[in-house]
Amino acid sequence: MADSTPGGYGSEPGPRPAPGPYISAVTNRTTNLVIRGAMLFSVGVFLALVLNLLQVQRNVTLFPPDVISSIFSSAWWVPPCCGTASALIGLLYPCIDSRLGEPHRFKREWSSVMRCVAVFVGINHASAKVDFANNVQLSLTLAALSVGLWWSFDRSRSGFSLGVVIALLATLATQLLVYNGVFQYTSPDFLYIRSWLPCIFFAGVITMGNIGRQLALLTVMLIS
Amino acid sequence: MTLRERLRQKISAAFYHHGLLCASYPVPIILFTSASILTCCYPLLRLPLPGTGPVEFTTAVRGYASPSHNPLGDPVERPDWYRGPPVAYIQQVLVKAAVSPWGSNLLPVDAFRPPLGQVFTLLEEIRNHVHSDSSGVQSLEHLCLQVTDLLPGLRRMQTVLPEHGCLLVSPGNYWQNQQELFDSDPDLLKTVQKHEPKGLHTSATLRDLLFGVPGKHTGVSHYSKKRVVTYTITIALSTYDAGFLGSLRARLKQLHPSANCSLGEEHMVHVHFKEEIGIAELIPLVTTYIILFAYIYFSTRKIDMVKSKWGLALAAVVTVLSSLLMSVGLCTLFGLTPTLNGGEIFPYLVVVIGLENVLVLTKSVVSTPVDLEVKLRIAQGLSNESWSIMKNMATELCIILIGYFTLVPAIQEFCLFAVVGLVSDFFLQMFFFTTVLSIDIRRMELADLNRRLPAEAGLPPPKPGPLRPREAPPPPRPSPHTITLQTPAFRNLRLPKRLRVVYFLARTRLAQRIIMVGTVIWIGILVYTDPAGLRTYLAAQVSEQSHLGDPGGGGGQPPHLGGMAPVFPGGDPAKALSVLPAREATPLPENQSQRHLAPGRVQEQPRGPPAATQVPWGAEDEEGWRRLSFRHWPSLFSYYNITLAKRYISILPVIPVTLHLGPQEAPETPRHPQDARLPPDPIPKFSSPDLQAADLTLYKVAALGLAAGVLLVLLLFCLYRVLCPRNYGQNGVSHGRRRRGDLPCDDYGYSPPVSEISPLLLRGHSMDIECLASDGMLLASCCLAGQIRVWDAQTGDCLTYIVHISISLGCEGRDPCVGGDSASEDEGGGFPFRRHAPPLRPPLFTDQPDLTPLIDTNFDSRLPPSSVHAAPPRGAAFDYGGLVERAYTEHEPPSPAAYPSPSYSSSPPTAGFANCRRSPVEAPDRGFACGPPPAAEWEGSVWAMELRGNLIAAGRSSGKLQLWDAVEGSLRCSNEEGASGITALAFLNNRIVAARLDGSLDFFTVELNKPPGLLQYRGAPGRGSMPPSPCYSSDDLISCQLTRSVLCAHQKPITVLRAAAGRVVTGSQDHTVRVYRLDDSCCLFTLQGHSGAITAIYIDETMVLASGGQDGAICLWDVLTGSRVSHVYGHRGDVTSLVCTNTCVISSGLDDLICIWDRSTGIKLYSIQQEVGCGDSLGVISDSLLVTGGQGCVSFWDLNFGDLLQTVYLGQTSDGQGVRQLLVLDNAAIVCDFGSELSLVYVPSVLEKLD
């Protein structure tokens, strides 16, 4: 009966004239990655611009003479850098999840992701708008908010550790850039920026990871 | 732990009672909630509406004192902001100057050069004015608002705006307040124009600031007809000194009396400015709002299984919004004035409060059993989720409390609002939303009843389960048990659902449009009522045009006096003049005493050029600042880094100054030599440079606005595409040839592109495929025509072909069997010609299996081996071949129905006959040599089929059970003990269980016997289960013996039968499920719990038992104890199929929904909407891969998340044929029926993903 028929499908898929799935699977994966990366990049650039605007606003009076130019007031390479970083992070998170073999199951919904992004913008907003008594208070508040963000929307150990590592690295890189004079803080109070930087980085990493995981869920498979 | 448990129980009980209460008295509770919402929101009436301009408050000048910071019990109603001293007191000196009478020797420049020149003397006068009284000597220097540097970005204005001194602006600032510079200026207009901003300007221009009146009212132009120059000297005072101001007023009036001026000077106006939102602030704000809307959208989309999805979504949003309003209202009530910008923190508040609780409540209530009473359902649902709701709320309160202890005022305030909002949100959820939910569910129940009743009444009750969902026309069957197949009635009932979906979409569109229209109206109202907005502009335009069209003045309606002044601010002075005589009848005392300097007054008619120009004073001059942009004052102060946001200024009544310059005086003012060179345009051109400039600006604004609008639309479109690529009705994405209407898409609206996996089409059946069975290697299918084909599940080759109409031998109907890629003819080999050589069969059929791999070969080349082994039948085969008329690419040996000799058979005419299945249409097509069709008809159609090993068990409508050899296509044995049709079969190990229409259950044992001596044994029962031929290849006889028959297993026809793990589970129309032990046919349990006929059962080797019924309920049972594990309601209508995996239960229903449930908790994870008629075709490939059938396609889903992975179209020309059956083989191939064809789909790429 069955053994009389030539070879099972699994053993030798060659003779079957169906090369389509294999090729398309390969192309799928790359296009999939590219699309996800592009989306994450654009989200990162957008958030960078908007949040930069929030920060700029802190030192601007009610009617600035040139508002539009203040959007692009920081160095031109900052938004692309943020975009690239967010694309990397967003791709890294699902990748690590799959490597660790523990798929992230906590609150896998777009509404949750939107909530996460809103809280992230809110944290930025608070750090930009609220007047804190001193930098320690600012740092502590932001740290508590960031950890709260992680606990509310992520709760995975890998996410936390990755967030901390990336936040520290990014802060270090920024500090190095500043010390070498490549980049200057627009604000005169130097400590102020340094105190919020790691927390914001951490929250951003968590947020982008969240978005990246959700995008990875969609598994966009486009066949050209 | 025990405390926790007790607490939990208490909470649960409390919620239960609360749910009962809410569902019992919905109307009073909703009334109560609305009343409390309104009460709590009442304090909000006092808060200003967002988005309007500055607000004003008028007090009397007499007895004015700067308001204190702490308002005492003041009888006068005063606004909240009217506290403390204002930022500044604005004193304007409104100068109107005219050269009159106009001499013909005067140049156009003379119309404004001398009047402007007068500003310097006036300034001198004001600066040097000193008032001395008992309190001391007051001068302007002491009283005025001292300003410091301009903002760093305003260096270019340094020359014109005062720095380090009094904030005193006048047109003289253009020339640094120096008469010499003015005199030596060759072109005054150019100087004025020089400082105008080039591009767009949203705030006030410098010209407006210095002149203090709108540009077109100044009269500083070559083409001004009126020749009255108006400007103001604006003084900002930091302290109010009534004495000084009074004396200054008196002094100026004395110097330059205004004859016909009747301006009131009793009131001062306090103007409070809102916080302006600049673009820099707007972008993050808009971003947060977009995120907020996305959040709300994604949240409310999860509401499911309710009557009105949108109604509940609206209720959820209303709950959150009104809880926010309540929180603000309560905070205001208790004296906490919100200092935060409401618009900014609002999105965050919504996000913090969240919609989750509402959704959880809905989900929990919806998943309670439908047959319960509504209030019990609500109560159960509430109490189920009570613990998690309380836990969440406690957590959120804790987080907010932590936030409160950051001791940052802004965060504290936010937390305060959030806490109050959370509590009021909880209150609203418990009272408002729960009640709304109960009303909704009650409505759904009624609607459900209405819907179900005709469906059940109109259908004949006896319906065998496996046949139910088919739409096949019921063929006439002369069976005593008339089984009416599923009539299309149910389908017809379902049609409106599709329509409803369309209406649903239309409704949502409608909602969007309503929102859009509302927004547009709101913006329109804002623009229209804005002080600097359209209304003013329109009014100005109207009055201007009426003036231009009727230069004599007085044409239009007279402007209203007094309070309506801002409505017609653009009324020209000439027109105002025409109404003025009426007011002159009430002369003011000052006017009378100083009338001697008003020569022009006598000439009331400004007729003719030489006539002196009367300087008109109208009511609109009283508050001339109203005509300015409402950003005038904020921008003036912002130049000095003084913000007016949330503060106010007090505008004192203007001091009118009239300057009359006689023609003899005018040339006295030193004319600049260049003045004469200016082209005097005798005809005042309509399009003056001013107007041109204004027009140009207008065009620029329009073009830019249009561009921005287009950009915004594009951006939104892209965003929409990214976020929601669902095609609403029309196929937006061009998928080339794949245009079959809606592509299936997943819960997120994502529709993956059509894959290029080409399914293997197994052609051969001429009618719709009825039964499918497989054991992994082989695949058996039976079509409506009664033809059974056996396929190789790996290659898709047709192995055997059993047609049931072989009556007259040698004339068997042939049908082509088109395999995937094999194309060969093989006619002779498998063709048995039994009548000729019954005894010779063994050698013939021994060879039979060998032929199967040779299908690919040419027929002629195969001749020698077959001739060697089966010489006798070969001739017949050739005869047969000669009868064939149709040529197909491949011919399969028409495996004959085994033809037992009449001598062996107890019922000769029918015994071994394959049946030409009931359709008369098919008969001529099928068997051109169909001898006695009536006899064949009686054989009955195949209702159930199973395949194990190489045996096909077929249960017929006549009650006969037949065993066929799958490879050879020969009938192995037949059992005709039962008369009632076999509705379901289960084939496990060596046992066959057959469920019959009369509710009885027969257990057969299949035995493999050594051929020779067992015929007698077989014959002993005389049941006719006879070995069809002694030609079994392995020399085994197959017997099928009825071991036990449970006569009344069920009261009604058995609809489902499943066997696994040594158990046989039957479901029947009598609402019960029975579990039998396979070994001894002992009934273990009778499971009761459904309130409708059982339509689907699932049991697997892990003893998971799930059953679904016509009531839409799904029950999970413990097979060992017979207890019900869980009970959920998921479908409206029958549950048509059920599959369980390790973690979830997948069910499909007649409502074309596929629901995925968590197996342990019974909570619905998500659902997938299927196309009509394809609801019950589903299969699980692995624990995480689900296959569903659609219209001409199969879709692969990720089970964990409900994502659509891939869609495979089955045919090139799909005419919307739905996949009704779907079978998953062991090698991850999927077989599904596709009309008369079978499709074999391999899922390699999906499998790769899984690994």
Image (spheres, coloured by chain):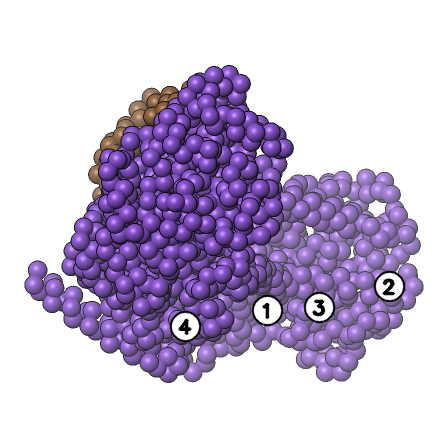
What separation in Å lies between label 1 and label 3 (alpha carbons)? 19 Å
Foreground residue, B624 or B720?
Answer: B720
Q: Is residue B700 left or right of residue B126?
A: right
Q: Colour of chain A?
A: brown
Q: Colour of chain B?
A: purple
Residue tagged by mark 1?
B653
Q: Disc 3 residue type? A: Phe
What separation in Å lies between label 1 and label 2 (alpha carbons)? 34 Å
Query: Which residue shows up at 37% across the image and 59% down it?
Result: B979
Query: Which residue shows up at 53% across the image and 42% down it?
Result: B808
Q: Is residue B508 visible?
A: no
Residue B1139 drawn at (x, y percent): 33, 49
Residue tagged by mark 2?
B549
Query: Which residue shows up at 60% across the image and 32% down it?
Result: B884
Residue tagged by mark 3?
B568
Residue tagged by mark 4?
B445
Q: Are marks 2 and 4 on the same chain?
A: yes
Q: Tell me the chain of label 4.
A: B
